[in-house]
Amino acid sequence: MSEFDVLRFLAIGQYLPSGSVLHRLDPRVKLTGIALFALALMLLASPTRALLGLVLALALLAAARVPLGHALRGLRPLLPLFVIALVLQVLFYPHREAVAAGSLAVLAWGPLVVSGAGLVGLGTMLLAMVDVVFLLTLLTAIADVSDITHGIEGLLRPLQRLGFPAHELSLMLVVALRFVPLLGQELERLLKAQAARGGDFGRRQGGIVQRVRRTLPLLVPLFLAALRRSEELVEAMESRGYTGGKGRTNLVRLQLRPADAVALFLVGCAGLLFLVVDFGPAEESVADWLRGLLTGA
Amino acid sequence: MTDWQSGESAIQRTPAPAQEAIAPLLRLQGVHHTYNAGAGREIPALRGVDLEIAAGEHIAIVGANGSGKSTLARHMNGLLVPTAGHVWVRGLDTRDPAHRRTIRHTVAMVFQDPDTQIISTVVEEDTAFGPENLGLPRAELRERVDWALEVVGLAGLRRRSPQHLSGGQRQRLALAGALAMRPACLVLDEATAMLDAAGRQAVHAIVGQLHQQGMAVVAVTQDMAEAARAGRVVVLAAGQVARQGPTREVLTDAAFLNEHGLDMPPATRLARLLHARRPAFPPDLLTPQELVAALRGGAR
Amino acid sequence: MSAPLIAVRGLEYTYRPGTPFATAALRGISFAVYPGEVVGIIGPTGSGKSTLLQHLDGLLRPQAGTVRVGDLDLADRATDLRAVRTRVALLFQNPEDQLFEQYVADDVAYGPLQLGLPRDEVRARVRRAMAAVGLPAEVYGDRLTQGLSGGERRRAALAGVLALEPQVLVLDEPTVGLDPRGRHELIALLQDWRCQADRAIVWASHAMDEVALLADRVVVLDEGRVALEGTAREVFGRDAALAALGLEAPAVRQVLGALVQAGLLPPSDALTVEEAVPLLESLVGQSDLGETAVPTVSAS
């Protein structure tokens, strides 16, 4: 594989047009539903909620016909983060106090103590992260760039009446999304051109000044190229009559359909479930189950 | 075969806007333009250009790099305004901001690099960008987009992402975006320079059709064979019009072209060499087709 | 026949192999570059020209097959690429975009400095390289890179590559975007460079007329394979094959081809305007001239 293929690293997530029910939803529903879900997971984390989140995320991925392998591959960049989180939790969680307060001592090896509560806390955090990654994978799988930008503009449009530049912002987003791959290609070209002249960008030696100097053959032309392209883009946009968002009409019209109403209703139900799941007997049984798991181990 | 040919019927269905019979479409008078290049340096890119373009004309603007061709082209739709002199589009002064919208949909421009003209991530949405800016109702947006995409032969790819189009297709998309403004005049600023032979031919064919239907075309170009397709040629040198006249006169004057760092179209070189050997053979042919026709006639 | 400077055998390369985006760019290419020659590489967009060029100096490594530069094997991971790049230097399209130093001489010196050469040698090479491109170091060395004209910047970028003092110069569309005078000048200085000391040039281009004029041998690529190969005369004589690949023939061949098709001339391999004229002359002399000619007093 070419070491110059920088676009590899720019892939946000893959659009997988499988034509499922989820794909056909209004983009605003896709965005809000998934955003609320992810927010809830991050703010209201608890072991039961994290597990519930996992079940729901997997169910949605299945409904969108996203292959499990693809979803799991999205977790790969997170692995180093998991390891760091594990180390931090082992070192900085107040394990002794937890054991003293009645938690299980999973590991007692000299000065190192790891409590069950600590592990559960870690597990919850990791599981929540996994859920959020699955949700992002889901979002990019069911919504392409056009969907996402129309969705964002659609959600922001009511604010336009208050003077909020909704169109300008969404246009900035569209242009940025179009230009990231273009500048990536430009960077790749520059890497190759300077390498062909003997430039070596893999070396790590030398002081900070030296290393920065070494990247100048890339940064300076890239910057100039970005400036040039943005000037050309402005000329093209002005030539096509662009004068800002005021008075513009739109070819694409977003309309909520019955399926969207159903989806919103289901999102509401899932939200309620999410909130109540930590009250009452549900938490007890999950805690028991976890305890059993750890003692049995 | 590209399906731009089906565009012919589409064009006849929706005729081009009516042309004014008397006043020229585009009029440049004493146009000067000076750039501020920073550090107190001023570069005079145009030093007094007078030019008139009638409705439905096809002209080519040629000149060495730095002669001011691109700067001149940008004055035609008001992207730039002269530092001295005037530019009128259908009688409207480009300096007056109130006329800007009308000018921009009377004169549309296509630039060299398709990637910096394509804004959206879906073909038909990009084509709609111009008409959307004009605030047209949705039904008319749809009609213009459909028409423009048919003319350039991309109707079947309307939901595609521009990333997945070839270079030639992307430039045709940029052309569609300009056509969706329903302009009376199309300005092409070296629009085929980045295309291969097939891409160039496709664009020439589309533009040729549009010209036949009454659209004025201004082609700024380095390609002498492309310039030979126009009816009139304007040669720029150092910011001034060195010469303008019928294509057949200007592009066959070897001495003049040489003096300004330009070439003759390749067919013309052949014709002149033949003429040198056989004085009765016409020296002022412009295209391979004309050359072949003259030779076939001679071999009867 | 002396040993080839570059030998390519069975070269294969696929972008993003093993993913859904895998594209096979080269499917088994074989050819060689000998000292003293100019090899032209032509082919429609997407035929693999750029990919092939990037293999010649080790920017890309073969996934199958071999690329040998002299005695260096580029498929071997252990090969020192720096050694390769002192023998084969690649100039990309629009190379003026890669200039990054503030002053011209500094940018030209980048390559030799990266090679780790002593300062004196670097200075000498910069002087030689800038002289070779017509930008003498005494005058242009201290100029601002961004202050040069487009054509001058391109020549400065070429100097940056010539300063590596390679045996083979690989060029990707070197004349695109230049005006006719700029094109002539660049071609002339490349010819000069090549004529010294058994150097070779590999030239990928869409400009058929230029390739026909300069190349000793031509390799035609189509979808990652060598479709045609031979001397320039042999390859450009194959009008039908080139047309089938979607390539536009040089103007001279277009004219001759049409006349051959009309049965007025036997097939020939004339390539340049000078060679074509005697053939065409024979047609002109046959009778009084056709419609487009100045009428002469004719015998009935």
Image: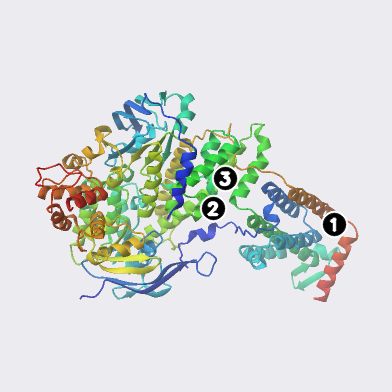
- Kindly indicate whether the residue at mark 3 contacts the one at mark 2 (C-beta within 8 angstroms): no
Q: Nearer the viewer, residue C76 or C56?
A: C56
- Where residue A49 appears, x then y in whole percent? 79, 58
From this view, report whether residue A85 is shown above or below residue B299: below
Q: Which residue is mark 2?
A: B160
Neighbourhood count class around disc 3 (C-alpha, 10 Å): few under 14, some 14–19, many 20 upward: some
- Where residue C237 appears, x then y in whole percent? 25, 64
Q: Which residue is mark 1?
A: A278
Which residue ends up furthest to the right in the rendered image? A281
Q: Which residue is at a point 47% across and 29% down the rendered structure image?
A: B102
Q: Which residue is at a point 64% across and 44% down the rendered structure image?
A: A152
Q: CA distance from mark 2 to mark 1?
A: 46 Å
Looking at numbered disc 3 in the image, what kind of residue is underneath it?
A: Leu
Q: Nearer the viewer, residue C255 or C45?
A: C255
Output the chain of dot 2.
Answer: B
**Which mark, by number, is residue A13?**
none
Quadrant of the drawing holding the C terminus of chain A: bottom right
Which residue ends up furthest to the front in the rendered image? C300
Q: CA distance from mark 2 to mark 3?
A: 19 Å
In terms of image quadrants, where is residue C272? bottom left
Q: Nearer the viewer, residue B145 or A192?
A: B145
Output the chain of dot 3.
Answer: A
**Which mark, by number, is residue A173?**
3
Looking at numbered disc 1 in the image, what kind of residue is underneath it?
A: Asp
Disc 2 element: loop
